[in-house]
Image (cartoon, grey):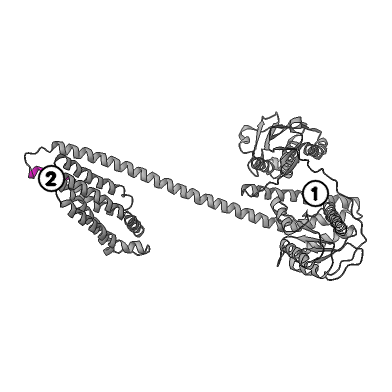
Amino acid sequence: MVKNTYHALAVSRAREFPSRVAFAVVIALGAAYVSHTLWPALWFVLQVGSQYLHHVVAAPLRRDPDRPVTRALELGYLGTQVLNGMVFASIAPFCWFAGGEAGRLAALVILLGGVLNLAVLGNASLKFVITGLAPVILAIFALPALTFLVEPGTSIGGMAFLTLGIGLFVAHLAIAVRKWETNEHGLKRALRASKVERLRAERANRAKSEFLTVMSHEIRTPLNGVLGMAQAMAAGRLEDEQRERLEVIRQSGEVLLTLLNDLLDLSKIEAARLQLEDGLVDVAELAAQAQAAFAPLAEAKGVGVKVWVADSARGVRRGDPMRVRQVIYNLMSNAVKFTEQGRVTARITATGPELVVEVADTGPGIAPDVLSTLFERFTQADASDARRYGGSGLGLSIARGLTRIMGGDITVHSAVGHGSTFTARMVLPQTDEVAAPVIPPPPVPSAPPLRAQAPAEEPAEGQVRILAAEDNATNRLVLKTLLEQVGLSASFVENGREAVEAWSTGRWDLVLMDIQMPEMDGVEATRQIRRLEGEQGRPRTPIVALTANAMAHQVAEYTAAGMDALSPKPIQLPQLLATIQQVLAAADDSDAAAVA
């Protein structure tokens, strides 16, 4: 502690050396003016010399922060401080005895100014302050006494009163400055601590987000196996009891997938890493989808559902359609889940660019003491709700986070026994553009059954030649099984490097490319294939990304690398087949245009 204190003082005093010389010039000139002597010039030389000596003695502390403060070094440092105080105080007698009333006032101001300067350093080192103050305080009380001895007839009552008053004022000022400095240091420490804690929280959020991203991939891999094989088994011949059990497996897997998606969304919202897609939102279509999605579930409970859209809200707006749908669905799901009788009504209105979604229910209502924590993650209105109604308690938290990203918020009005009304506001500017209509999945493309082949083999003429890059054995088996059930087959490789090699030695109609793979990922493999196509003059091979990483910025990265489409994991066979048909049709159109 002593080492750090003296080191900090040495550095601080070294920085102040030029300003101390400048102040010495001012004091010397003032003293020369009031005393009409040349003694202040000698004092200036002595003052600068003592300051420089102090500067030299403190040099080892400045150069080496870890240097131990020996007894000799401490005595030398404090000794030069005493010398500084003595030289500084010596200017006062010149002014006091040779300058009349003005000189005496100047002497007091100089001495008390020195007291103030040293007093504010009290929190640095008490020894340092005492050794510097002693000569100055001695001079303050010695001057009136010397005056009485040198000039016995002089009345020193007024001077003593003036000295006392100025001394009290300087003491009060010193205390005030010390308090201000202490408060400032405390505030700076608090700000530094707050900044450190904020950085730690941000690092923790980033680490959590990265952890969940990695775990998402690891969890989705076995989940893809569960849901994929459930789809494959459902397409075969099963007894009713087997089909019922299989449906339980499928539903449980989809619930797990929903929970996984919610955790990832919440993590990205908290880490400010969730990016919205700049798309088109057809409000009326979203309302119809919500009506169709929740009506069967509500009717099974004897609850009515109505989604009503005002004329002011109809039309197309700019925004992320998936996230707007997520907000509406989360609010609708919450209302239907907690409403046992009566109805759930959703009203969608708009004021200029602001879209307002009000979802009212006739459920049990929410107690006032619960409303303040309702939007916190993993929170439900009652601890027993998780057992009675199920759910993770993430839906409302995610919905509020999404609305805030979209420039709005969610509020709730509720009373116990009188239901609840949730109001979501989102800024979605109107546009004259036309949103693409929802197209039902195309029919399954017909093709004769294919045998699984090694990558280097040439498929038979007329068959759809599919190269699939997938590093996980379970995912390979799932994809192989699902494709074979509809008469398609694929040749498999286990990483991006092998995919580029297989593509280079064969002719393929389509590449199904995983993203996260060892040795070379799917994005780099796609870049390599597109580069080789250009160098060798080969026709463009459609490449479809198979991945769970399907955020807007990730899709943009895949597109920039040269991928043609994306089919998300866990694999949903109808969606995968629709994507395959789409890219193959586009490739045929491109070839036809090239021939023409």
Q: Quadrant of the N terminus?
A: bottom left
Query: What's the mark number on residue 98?
Result: 2
Q: Which residues are magenta?
A: 141-150
Q: Position of residue 385 (x, y in %)?
A: 70, 40
The first of marks 2 and 1 along the sequence is: 2
Residue 358: quadrant of the picture? top right
Q: Nearer the viewer, residue 141 or 443?
A: 443
Residue 310 visible somewhere in the drawing: no
Residue located farthest toward the top when viewing the structure as drawn: 418
**Mark 2, secondary structure of its residue:** helix
Q: Position of residue 169 (x, y in %)?
A: 26, 39
Frontmost of labels 2 and 1 is 2
147 magenta-colored: yes
At label 1, the amino acid type is: Gln
At label 2, the amino acid type is: Ala
For the stretch drawn in magenta, what is the main secondary structure? helix
Query: What's the mark number on residue 126?
Result: none
Task: Look at 11% across and 45% down and name the residue there.
Answer: 146
What whole-number distance in Å separates the C-alpha atoms at marks 2 and 1? Answer: 102 Å
Task: Look at 88% across and 51% down and name the residue there.
Answer: 243
Residue 453: quadrant of the picture? bottom right
Q: Which residue is the site of mark 1?
A: 251
